[in-house]
Structures are given as C-alpha cells and as structure tokens.
Amino acid sequence: MKKKLLSGNPVLLLFLGAAPALASSTSVTSALGMGIAVIGVLLCSALVLGLLRNLIPEEAKLSAAVIVVAGFASMAQLLLHAFLPSAYAMLVFYAAVLGVDLMLFGSAENAMDAGLGKGLVNALVSGLCFLVFVLILAAIRELFGAGSFAGKAVDGLKDIKIALLCQPSGGLFVFGILLAVVNKLFPSTDGAGALTSASAFLESEQKEAEA
Amino acid sequence: MKKQPVLRSVLCLLLLLAVLAAGVYGINGFTAPRIAENERLAAEAAAAAEKALLGNSVMLFDREDEAASTISVSADTVQSVYQDDERGLYLVRLSTSEGYSKLPILLTLTLDYDGKIVSLDINENPDDKELGEEFPLSFEGQDSTLAGVNLVAGVTFSSSAIRNAVNDGFNALIDNGLFAAAEKSDDQLLNELLPQVYPGLVNKAGVPQGEELAGSGSVSSGIKAANGSGFAWFVTGDESLLAVDSALDTVKLYNTAGEDVTGTADSSLIEEIQALSDANADDYTDKDLKAFGRMLDEDAELTAVEIPGLCNSVNGAYIAQTADGERYAFVARPYGYSNEVMDFYYVLDEDGAIDAFRIAELIIYSEYYSAYTLDEDSYKEGLLGLTQDSYTGEQTLISGATMTSQAADTAMQDVFEAYRLLMESRG
C-alpha cells in the first residue's frame, strides 16, 4: 500500500491526473475538495462499469469508460456547486477538467478488465493516491508560496514566502522536486529509470488484473 | 454479420449515454433549486455587506446616475461618492484600468471629514503580480499629498495606477469644496514636476528610472538617469529648486511652481550642478560612434552636437559629413520591457527622413512567455523613409509586445523632436 501510494502513485509515476492535481493544489482546501470529487467519480465509475462489464462489447469499452466518467464528473460538479459552494468557487474550471482526466479513464478501464471487487479497490486506491499527492503538493505550495495553511496565515512563514510557488511554473517545480524525492527514497528494485519503472508498473498492473 | 457487433456497440453506448444523461438531468433537477438558493443568499450577503459599509450614507455622486448626483466629478476613475454623516466619513468607489493587465482594478477609499484616509480596500485586482499587504496599509492616515505612499518595486504600473486613482478620489472631494487640499512639501512638488520637465528620466508610468545620488553643497540629492540622458538634482536653500542637466542641453532650473528660473539663478549654482553631473556621467561616445560606423560609409566624419531644449530619451546627437551629404545621427535610449534600456540608433537625411535604423536587440525574447515571431528585417525596412509628418505610430507597433512597441514609439518621437530642435538651433 505504501509503495502504491508513493512510488507506485499513478500521478507521480505515469503523470496521470497531473493537470487537475497541479491546477487545484494552490490551496489545501481546494486540493481536498478536488481529491474527494476524484474519489467519488472513480468509485461510481468503477461500480457502474464493473457491473456492466459483461454487457459492454470489447470494441466499445473505451468509449463506455469516457461516457461514464464524463457523466459522473458532471454530476460531481453539480453536487459540489449545490452542497459545497465555497469549495466549488475555488475549483470551478478545475472541476470541469475532471471530465477529461486520464487517470479516471484508466481506472474505469481497469474496472472493466479486473471485475467489480478488484475494480472498486483499485479505484479507491487510485483516488487515495491522487488525494495524498495533491494534499502534499498543496501543503508545500500554500505554506511556502502563500504563507498560510487551509486559508489561515502561519506566523513566520508570511515573511519568507515565495510567491512563484503559487504560480503554474511553481507548481511544476514542486512537482519535479517531489518526483525526485520519491524516486530517491523508493527506487525501483532493478535500479532502472522512470520510464522503465513505468512500463514495469503497467505490466504488473495488467498481470494483477488478469489474475 | 460483421455489422452486428458494431450495431451492438453503438446501441450499448447510446443506452449508456441515455441513462447517464438522465442521471445528470435528475441530479440537475435536484441541485438547481439549491444552487439558485445559494446564489440568492450570496447576493443577499453581498447586499447586506454593502449596506453595512454604506450605513445611512447619502449618495453624492454615481457615475451611472449622474442626474441624481449633487456633486460633479470629471475623473473617470471615480465611480461613486457617498457621505456618511453619522460616522463622519466619505466613501469613494474607484475603478482604474491603468494597471499592468489593463483590466479594471476596483477600490474603495474611505476618508474622514479632515481629508485623511481611514482605509483603502482593493476589492478586485486582476493583475498577476502581488501588491502585498503593506501597500494598501501605507495609505492609511495619509492626506491628499500621499507623501508616505511609495510604489511597489516590480509592480510599479499597478501600484502607480492605484495611487493615481486615490489621487483622483481626493480631487473629486477637494474640487467640490468638501475639504481643503493638504499642503505638499517642496520635495513632493519637485518630484511631481520631474516627469513634465524631464521626460527622458521616467518610464511610461511616470516613474523615474535611475540611480539615486548624494549631493553636496546646495544640492541635497540627485537621480542619474539609467539611460544616460542626464541628471535631475534637488537644490535646497532659500528656495527649493529642481535642476535638470540633460546630456544634450545646458542646466535648467525650475521652482516648485514649475517656472523656469534658470535666467535668474546664481552662476555658481549652475557650475556646481555641472561639476556634479560631470563627476557621475558615463561616456557613451565610443559605443555610439562604433554603431554609427556600421550604418554610415567609411569616410563619414561625425561631430557631436548639443541640442538646446532637449531632455527626452535622446542622449546622443551627431552631424555626419558623408559622401551623400550631411546626415544627422541620433541615439535614443527609452525604457522597454521590465524598464530595460533599449538602444535605438537613427540616421536622418537632410529632409528629416529616416535613412538608416539599427537596434541590437529589438525583442527581449527571454522575457516573453508566449511563442513570438517577428520579421525584424521587414519591421526595420518599414521605418526607412519616415518623417515626423508621415509617422503615425502604427509603423512601430509590434503585436503582442506592448512595452517594446511603446519604447520604439518613444524613441521615434524623441528622435524627430531632436531633429526639429537641432534644425531650429541651426537656423
């Protein structure tokens, strides 16, 4: 689980879901909102596609994944707008971007291959991976970029804040640093580079699904 | 037979689409009233906040309802003025589009009846660059002179826009006799005079660009222009004066009322100022001659000249004797992107038309985020043959490079002005 959350994290390893992650990580509050929305969409999509997997023809599986994810992303957006208007106000555009998030499509396809039970577990784990990553990213960016945490100013940090970290370029910079740290702490067992680790990871995922 | 799997896929997807669309429709039906209620509550909260702010204020001016206004305001930045007798306050709503992004910056200025700022709230700032918390706080307690308000380094366009808007707010109340203007110090008056009498020292936002220098004797301090166009010196004594020592003209002295008092000034003061300038001046002659050497024929002889009355961005002027006749070479150094000094070299012919043009780095490529293309050769060709009459401003325009375009326009206009004054001085 630890390996999956960190070195096996689809965001860090395969850069899936990096766009909404980077976009919503300017504050911890918006990151939490986005993370919860992602977990919700992942679980609902996995449930529906897991139940219907035997009914959907092989040729139509990808299209079905797109339709289901887009549908649930739209529902998530509406529910956020209605019940968490303050979080929605921070996310707005980023919530709409969920409908084109590759990580969600990948997880949905996996649910159709692996079955309902495994699909739900994978969806939950992927969602948690995303949530952990985006919260860590948001915490760093908000603390050192804005001198606050969840909107509350932190004494001592306001004077040394680096405003660039709240800009898109700053987000990519922090992302790169996180990637380097995780790769250093949890290198792949054969010492191979990131791309090789990524393909090995995908192979192991596929084997797990087939099993 | 092959059609069956395709048909089945299409039907399956259509069914899925229909079910999900129904789901989204259902959720929308369930959430729409709640969203509408949230928006209604948000609007009510905003109205309540506005009411709390205005209290029992009386509207004195509203740009959208000038017929009902009891005072007249000319400045476009002032949107509305309210008077709150209970709290002894004036509330002025301001909107300025002179910031970096040219999008409206919305402000609320609160003043007491003595003409002092109680608070300045920046309600909306679309600019990316942060002004910081200290900037709006620096307005509190200030009177109409705004003596204690400094611009924010790196955000000069937006902070200057806000300062000017607040100034408009003050003027709106002062002009209508609601309170008296505070007296500005001599230093302030002279600093405000600077952009008018020495445009070569300031950028497009009117902010001086240069190094502060210590003075000596009667001269308390000075500014050395970053573009080498000259110096501004502040003189203290019986009368506070501003001395402008331009690179191509003699020293000029101005009093706090903006009057040219050079003729009545002590010659020893003028000598003192010239000595200070000479001690701090940089010599651009070698650089200029090298550049013009590439633009003129080998046998051209260049003689440096002074131009009386000139103190803009032109800091080098030469008369060149060439095989084709007399030519006039000028160097203009306006402030471009990020206030970087740009070197524009021009050679004009006897009719004042541009004969040659040169610039080392027209576009500071590393400073622009978006992919950028400009056919520099065509751009430069388009400037040849232009005169002061035929130049419209459009010829120097570079799409997507506003500050570079402004610098090129400034250089062009300043060079034509330099040529005109040179011809006038030669009779």
Image (cartoon, coloured by chain):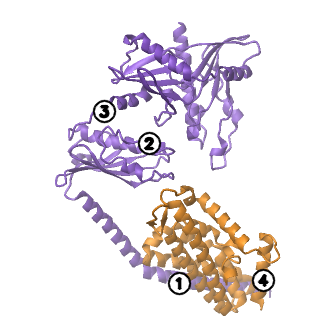
Chain colours: A orange, B purple
Query: Which element is circle 2 on?
Result: loop
**Tag 1, which chain?**
B
Residue beneath label 4, please? A204
Task: Please tell me the numbered disc located at residue B184.
Answer: 3
Q: What is the chain identity of the residue bearing mark 4?
A: A
* Quarter of the image where one finds residue B147: top left
Mark 2–mark 3 distance (CA, rounded to whole Å): 18 Å
Check disc 3 and report its element: helix, strand or loop. loop
**Front of the two marks 1 and 2:** 2
Q: Earlier in the sequence, mark 1 or mark 3?
A: 1
Residue indicated by mark 2 = B151
Horizontal and vertical percent position of residue B69 = 22, 46
Q: Amino acid at mark 3?
A: Lys
Q: Which amino acid type is shown beneath numbered disc 2?
A: Leu
Residue B79 at x, y percent in the picture? 32, 48
In the rendered image, which residue does mark 1 sit on? B22
Where disc 1 sits, the SS reads: helix
Circle 2 chain: B
Say whether residue B23 is left or right of residue B39.
right
Q: Furthest residue to the left?
A: B86
Disc 1 versus disc 2: distance between alpha carbons? 56 Å
Vertical arrangement, residue A94 with respect to residue B196, above or below: below
